[in-house]
Image: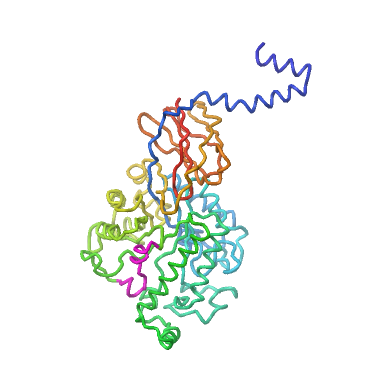
Amino acid sequence: MNLSSIIKYHRDYNPVRAAIFIILLAMMLPLVKAADFTLDARLQPTPPLREFRGVWVATVYNIDWPSRPGLSAAQQQSEMIAILNRAASLRMNAVIFQVRPMADAFYKSRVEPWSYYLTGEMGKSPGYDPLTFAVQEAHRRGLELHAWFNPYRAKTGSKMAVSSKHVSRSQTSVIRRAGKGLWMDPSSSFTRERMITVVMDVVKRYDVDGVHIDDYFYPYPEAGGGAAFDDNANWNSYRKKGGQLNRGDWRRDHVNRLVRELYSSIKRSKPQVKFGVSPFGIWKPGYPSTVEGHLDAHGELYADSRRWLHEGWLDYVSPQLYWKNKGPQSFNELYNWWQAENSKGRHLWPGIAISRIGRGGEGDGRSAGEIITQINITRKNRGRAPGTGHIFWNEKALRKNTGNINQTLVTQAYTQRALVPASPWLGNNKNMPQAVVTRASLNGDRLSLKWYPESKRASSVRWWVIQVLEGKQWRIAQTVPGAATGIDVLNASKITAVAIRPVDAAGGVGRAAALRK
């Protein structure tokens, strides 16, 4: 009796049993389909390729997103999806999303007002939570999302109205004029505590992969910083109480305390959320001696970024090495100097300026080929760092495809997908569950995969990485969130084996479930 006859027999004589039989048959079909690929315990895929490939998405002045204030929620979301789709299609794996450009918020905050750059009116809700949306959509595409905060800027030089909730109106005693803008005094304990409060609010309530702060510490000299910055009241109070530091060391000490306390606060709450800083690319003039430095970030921005690296107060550092490879500020010389200073073996993911390709705007005449050269420099010297990587300034250059950078990346630098490098000092889950594959079937040019985690420790899985074998080479086909239980791999006709591996939040990789065709 064939299958159709069995179903007809039960339907005619016992309809209830027929219904149960059909349901059970449907449940068994994935297991039957799995016969297209067979589990092979002897099959060991090569370790996944590792490299951090990030891009900054700036919101201040609407540089990258949204394109202008006042767009509808649907328009904003459409623009964000285009950014994330572009990053994923270029085989990148991270976005650095600016959520606090000037003591405001691109997320629902009880502490600071909605950003002007969302709606054109500070304090006005855009009708949804942009950070929640960005995190969910980034993860859906296998992209990490790092929340980027500016620690001290209170207001840019624009004439926008500020809300009553904004720090420049509610805490006027900590506000200082800095050129055409406003700054929160770094020597104020309120400023430090407010920054830690807003960062930890995001860390606790949002599923971000990292926290990121930029190079704006004390303001740049041309923006009213350096000796012109007015922190006299706090300085005089410090000296009257017997303080012994000189003014430069005193200022650096406040910035150091912020960096150190941010790092420890994040690690107490969510140890595997990465913390990174993107300081000015030259620590201070004369370091290294082969490089010509004009701005003294150590002595004018009061940013002792080398110390943060030496102390291990961060998980990654992204010095803004926006210069060409040759010249008075050589990318190669600076990168090698930073790598030599990386005594703790933290991640070194330099900032690379794709915005300077060509002429016009920020362009200085460099080609997309020079960007490839700089990426290759990072790959040749990773020093003590556990992996290589870089972050592009900025997303707008990818949107415009400046100098044909997108095609150059996918054909020369990003020919394969890569996982974010592991951070072994953050620990790992050695008992991550292996994937139990229930379906691995090939239908034409589409490989359909279904699985579930083998144990109750599914929460330890941050990502599943899908590797496929074509010829003799394993490559990453896709990275999907830990909650995923299935995926379709396209263009699969040449695939002869497939593997599914769990990845934890620190980047550790677990045992592969491997199947052969």
- The N terminus lies in which quarter of the figure? top right
- Is the residue 95 above or below the residue 474 in the image? below
| Quadrant position of the C terminus in the picture | top left
Residue drawn 36% across and 83% down? Answer: 244
Residue 450 visible, this angle: yes
Question: Where residue 118 appears, x then y in whole percent?
Answer: 55, 63
Judge whether residue 353 can be spotted in this image.
no
Magenta stretch prevailing secondary structure:
helix
- Left or right relative to 2: residue 295: left
Write down the region rendered in magenta: 295-312
Taking depth in this image into account, of 394 and 189 the one nearest to the observer is 189
Instruction: Examine the rendered structure and indicate whether residue 37 appears above or below residue 403.
Output: above
Indicate the quadrant where residue 20 lies: top right
Residue 463, compared with residue 345, is above or below; it is above
Q: Residue at x 38, y 36 (%)?
A: 46
Q: Position of residue 14 (x, y in %)?
A: 78, 19
The total number of labels drawn is 0
Asked whether, in this view, residue 62 is left or right of residue 279, the answer is: right
